[in-house]
Image (tube, rainbow, N blue to C red):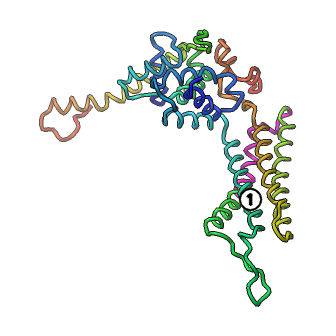
């Protein structure tokens, strides 16, 4: 496998797994054929188009979820950081008060922005996910319940991090485990969203039939009636 | 209809083509102006197939990989023709206007239609 092929294959991960199963090999051969001979890296144009194409397939719900997860990871990471000696300086001499160093301004700004993003995206992520999973239909209810559960778990994790951060004396390693738990939550939420959208615009490339039958996955078209 | 979509459909007028051939043909037809990236091509193909404008006609294995050829469907061909005549009409607005100017030297206003 050439390095160009390996990197192109890696780039194709911008698309969801179910999509790659149908289209991946075909897109890879087109990518390789269209590349100038002797190249080791996919071109910037190709990279950009694949990232945009992948985002279109994954959808808004996934993108918002990833932003929400990133914000949560930054916040819990920050709460952990706030318990470390970098953050808390020595007692203010002669007063008995604990002095706060509060770290570089950039860290503060990032933490405040992350909190704003986390709060702002909570309901969009909830609603976007329920919509994407077609939570009001019978077939989508289980996944919708899982989705709501994931958001409640996220809320609880953040509250727990705050509680631990406030009561801890010394470095609170529990905060770090919550930060890791956030990333696991992100993986779980990606997994819940992993299937193709119910009304997929992506056709089944193996189907020769016309318009009505060309929905992917097979049978997804039935839901429209 | 967006320009890449238009040229993808136009590239299939002479018969079915596979992915890379569509990229090459599109570039040639547009005089090198429309150079489709692979990701853009497949986004367009997905949509066109779902709309029934394009269909899979052949699947073969080349160098161990699936190579799929796509062809224009009758609805796709008529959508392409409709778009072509719409653009021709829009172009006439300007080209006829230019001729009117030539016919009346020194004229500042548009000649009445």
Say which element carries label 1. Answer: helix
Task: Give the magenta-colored segment's residue range.
Answer: A120-138
Residue position marked by numbered label 1 in the rendering: A77
Q: How many marks?
A: 1
Q: Quadrant of residue A98?
A: bottom right
Residue drawn at (66%, 38%), measured in percent from left and top? A59
User: Could you classify mark 1 by the number of other residues whose Cα lies within 10 Å: few (under 14), some (14-19), or many (20 or more)?
Assistant: many
In the rendered image, which quarter contains the N terminus of chain A?
A: top right
| Quarter placement of the C terminus of chain A | top right
Q: Residue placed farthest to the bottom in the image?
A: A94
Residue A3 is situated, as x and y percent measured from the top left of the image, at 56, 28
Please name the predominant secondary structure of the magenta segment in the image: helix
Q: Quadrant of residue A61?
A: top right
Q: Relative to B8, is A79 above or below?
A: below
Q: Is residue A137 above or below residue A113?
A: above
Q: Is residue A174 left or right of residue B82?
A: right
Residue occupying the point 54% across, 35% down: A47
Residue B62: which quarter of the image? top right
Subunit ID for the residue under disc 1: A
At 49% across and 17% down in the image, what residue appears? Answer: B78
Where is residue B65 drawn, in percent x and y? 61, 15
Query: Residue B98: image x %, image y %?
Result: 23, 32
- Is residue B47 located in the magenta-colored stretch of the structure? no
Nearer to the camera, A14 or A121: A14
Residue B19 lies left or right of residue A96; in this view the side is left
Q: Position of residue A192 (x, y in %)?
A: 79, 38
Residue at x 76% of width, y 67% of height:
A84
Is A191 rendered above or below residue B96?
below
């Amino acid at each position: 496998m050439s390095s160009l092929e390996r990197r192109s294959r890696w780039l194709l991960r911008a698309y969801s797994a179910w999509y790659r199963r149908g289209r991946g090999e075909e897109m890879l051969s087109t990518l390789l054929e269209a590349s100038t001979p002797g190249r080791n890296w996919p071109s910037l144009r190709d990279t950009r188009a694949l990232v945009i194409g992948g985002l279109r397939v994954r959808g808004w719900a996934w993108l918002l979820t990833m932003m929400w997860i990133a914000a949560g990871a930054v916040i819990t990471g920050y709460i952990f950081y706030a318990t470390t000696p970098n953050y808390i300086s020595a007692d203010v001499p002669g007063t008995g008060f604990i002095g706060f160093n509060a770290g570089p301004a950039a860290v503060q700004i990032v933490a405040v922005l992350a909190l704003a993003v986390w709060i702002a995206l909570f309901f969009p992520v909830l609603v976007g996910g329920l919509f994407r999973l077609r939570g009001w239909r019978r077939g989508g209810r289980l996944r919708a319940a899982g989705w709501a559960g994931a958001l409640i778990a996220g809320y609880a994790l953040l509250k727990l991090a705050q509680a631990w951060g406030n009561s801890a004396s010394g470095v609170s390693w529990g905060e770090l485990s919550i930060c890791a738990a956030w990333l696991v939550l992100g993986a779980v939420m990606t997994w819940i969203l992993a299937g193709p959208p119910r009304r997929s615009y992506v056709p089944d490339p193996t189907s020769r039939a016309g318009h009505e039958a060309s929905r992917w996955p097979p049978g997804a078209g039935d839901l429209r009636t | 209809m967006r320009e890449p979509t238009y040229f993808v459909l136009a590239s299939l007028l002479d018969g079915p083509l596979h992915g890379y051939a569509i990229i090459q043909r599109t570039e040639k037809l547009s005089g090198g102006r429309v150079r489709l990236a692979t990701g853009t091509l497949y986004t367009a193909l997905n949509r066109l197939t779902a709309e029934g404008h394009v269909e899979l006609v052949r699947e073969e294995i080349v160098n161990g990989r699936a190579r799929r050829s796509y062809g224009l469907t009758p609805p796709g061909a008529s959508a392409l023709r409709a778009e072509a005549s719409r653009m021709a009409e829009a172009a006439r607005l300007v080209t006829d206007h230019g001729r009117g100017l030539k016919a009346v030297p020194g004229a500042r206003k548009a000649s009445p239609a």
